[in-house]
Image (cartoon, grey):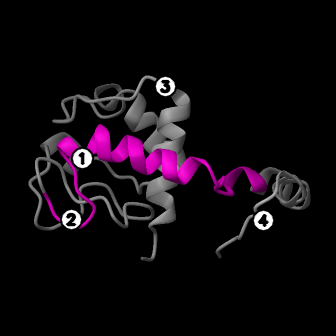
């Protein structure tokens, strides 16, 4: 289900009021472009959206089982993990990948919670595209 958020603050506030806690999943109009910028400056050193690089491609990461891109060679630790990527798990991963999955190959992390949220919102906005 796609939700459209009105361009005005009043529209966004109304949407959040109608959907209550589900409103937290609504992407803010500012977060997606900011997330794209952070992705392009920090994440794209190892990741692309549509091809494997040092890291696996990330378009469609939401709802995808971890370590499931067949063309990418994942760490044994990530291959043995049994989860599907969602907002909560991506936030935990981007906070400290090695704490989430010890012995993983990814050491990069984003310290800022707002940067993590923006990148996650950006990746989420690409789902189904």
Disc with the residue nearer the chain's start (4 vs 2): 4
CA separation in Å, label 4 and label 2: 35 Å
* Residue 64 visible in this rendered orientation of the protein: yes
Residue found at x 19% / y 40%: 77
Residue found at x 21% / y 35%: 106
Residue found at x 36% / y 32%: 100
Disc with the residue nearer the chain's start (3 vs 2): 2
Disc with the residue nearer the chain's start (1 vs 2): 1
Q: Dot 4 corresponds to which residue?
A: 6
CA separation in Å, label 1 and label 4: 30 Å
Residue found at x 74% / y 64%: 5
Q: Dot 1 corresponds to which residue?
A: 44
**Which label number is shown at residue 69?**
2
Disc 4 or disc 2, which is closer to the eye?
A: 4
Q: Secondary structure at mark 1?
A: helix
The magenta stretch spans residue 5 = no
The magenta stretch spans residue 34 = yes
Left or right, 20 with reference to 30: right
Position in image of residue 102 (x %, y %): 25, 29
Q: Dot 3 corresponds to which residue?
A: 112
Left or right, 58 with reference to 23: left
CA separation in Å, label 3 and label 2: 28 Å
- Between residues 119 and 29, which one lies in front from this camera angle? 29
Q: Note whether 33 is above or below 116 in the view shown.
A: below
CA separation in Å, label 4 and label 3: 27 Å
């Amino acid at each position: 289900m796609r939700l459209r958020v009105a361009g005005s603050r009043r529209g966004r506030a109304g949407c959040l009021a109608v959907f209550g806690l589900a409103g937290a999943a609504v992407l803010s109009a500012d977060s997606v472009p900011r997330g794209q910028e952070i992705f392009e400056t920090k994440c794209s050193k190892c990741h692309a959206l549509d091809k494997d690089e040092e890291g696996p491609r990330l378009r469609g990461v939401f709802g995808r089982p971890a370590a499931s891109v067949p063309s990418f060679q994942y760490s044994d630790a990530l291959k043995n993990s049994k989860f599907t990527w969602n907002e909560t798990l991506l936030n935990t991963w981007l906070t400290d990948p090695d704490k989430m999955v010890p012995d993983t190959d990814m050491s990069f992390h984003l310290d800022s919670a707002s940067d993590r949220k923006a990148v996650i919102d950006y990746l989420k906005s690409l789902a189904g595209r």
